[in-house]
Amino acid sequence: MSDSYDVKDLGLSTEGINRITWAEREMPVLRLIRERFERERPLAGIRVSACLHVTTETANLMRTLQAGGAECVLCASNPLSTQDDVAAALVAHYEMPVYAIKGEDNASYYRHIAACIDHRPQITMDDGADVVSTLHSTRREALSDVVGGTEETTTGVIRLRALQREGKLAYPIIAVNDANTKHFFDNRYGTGQSTIDGIIRATNTLLAGKTIVVAGYGWCSRGIASRAHGMGANVIVTEVNPLRALEAVMDGYRVMPMADAAPLGDIFVTSTGNQNVIDWHHMELMKDGAMLANSGHFNVELNLEALAAWAVRVRQPRPFVQQYELPDGRTINVLGEGRLINLAAAEGHPSAVMDMSFANQALSAEYMIRNHASLSKEVYSVPAEIDADIARLKLHAMGVSIDVLTPEQEHYLNSWTIGT
Ligand code: ADE
């Protein structure tokens, strides 16, 4: 057992082990990587500090890094996303220091990040860039040991690019989010399914016949819109980007400004990466009983401060539902405190999709250790060969085979002389 940790209850570890093993069944690509890592030990002795959602899938990633020889510590990347049984299992069974408790307050959240930085990482692995941002602000003394990092999510990559633009990024970081085998699948199918899962677990509401307003039409939002439509909801999309708005229109959704959608929606879901996307002047127009959820990385998309100041009473009718009563008697239901609803009220993306995201993480960490000396202090893409290998391995694991180009077809594709 690890002797350094902060988790809710080590007594939950058996349940955690069972669920980690269950998730592993759907993570064949990561399992193959783990088997190779066990043989080759590419991360032998490397200190890795990971700040990720502490889920069964993350546990399988951590086991993979450990199999490769890494000395890992893990903290949560969101105060509400930790699965306490998984945190307990990692400490008690997999001998890994973990600092994460579901529902931790902001002070504990940052104390746990500090504990991860005290590990003096050579590799950082972030989901949302909170370790990177802490290292670049209050913990600069620890930067000297870091040779590289990886970043899991869109919001984190946006923060890293801002650091790079200001010329302040202190080490190379691979944007795992931008791999095709990550965002085409995790962001779309993972967020799509798990967001709907979170809303249903929190409320037990019927989606058929409801009007769902989806804010944003990036990869995550289009997954949410498509799954909500599949469940029989009428979907309205709001956007600020004309191209994405046009795509949403041609995908068959109604598109309008949030102020027009506000009186029509029964359920609102934000996934834009921006703040106050649903503001009080939108809430002012909403129906009695409207439900608001966020699936973006940070809890800034709903203006809950304004709602709290305006409401006369707040009740908790169910776990993960806070019901704000307004002065005119209407109620607005906020799900999961406006934090990532798929991880707050459900279990995050299913294992089969995290298989590819975390295969990218494991292989990017290996790549970083092999190549950091020749990299600059920039945000890098996942190497195309790694991305393509993961797609091939996933198809193979799913028992799907595909065609190969004939020599004539190869020649045709490489030629400019053959025309009509
Ligand atoms: N992000 C979204 N879903 C996740 C999961 N199941 N595990 C880790 N990170 C996630």
Image: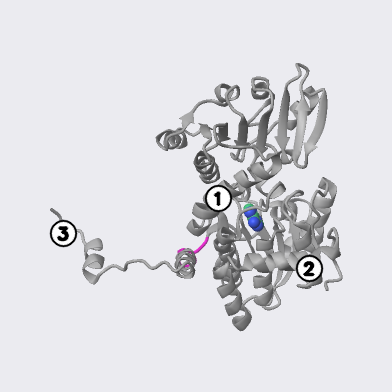
Q: Is residue 393 above or below residue 155?
A: below
Q: Which residue is mark 2?
A: 14
Going by the numbered disc 1, the residue's amino acid type is: Asn
The mark that comes first in sequence, 3 or 2, is: 2
Whichever of callouts 3 and 1 sits on the residue coming sooner in the sequence is 1
Q: Is residue 384 magenta?
A: yes
Mark 3 crowdedness (10 Å alpha carbons): few <14, some 14-19, many ≥20: few
* 354 relative to 280 in the view: left or right: left
Q: Which residue is mark 1?
A: 187
Ligand 1: image quarter: bottom right
Lower position in the chain sequence, tag 2 or tag 1: 2
Instruction: Write down the quadrant of residue 297 in the picture.
Output: top right
The location of residue 236, given as percent across then percent down, is: 52, 31
Q: Any magenta on residue 51?
A: no
Q: What is the C-alpha distance between the residues marked 2 and 1?
A: 30 Å
What secondary structure characterizes most of the magenta part?
Answer: helix
Dot 1: element: helix
Task: Name which residue type carries label 2.
Answer: Thr
Mark 3 touches mark 1? (CB < 8 Å): no
Query: What is the distance, in whole Å, between disc 3 and disc 2 at their CAs?
Result: 64 Å
Q: What is the CA distance from the residue labelled 3 to the residue labelled 1?
A: 40 Å
Task: Say which residue appears at 61% left-offset and 54% top-offset.
Answer: 349
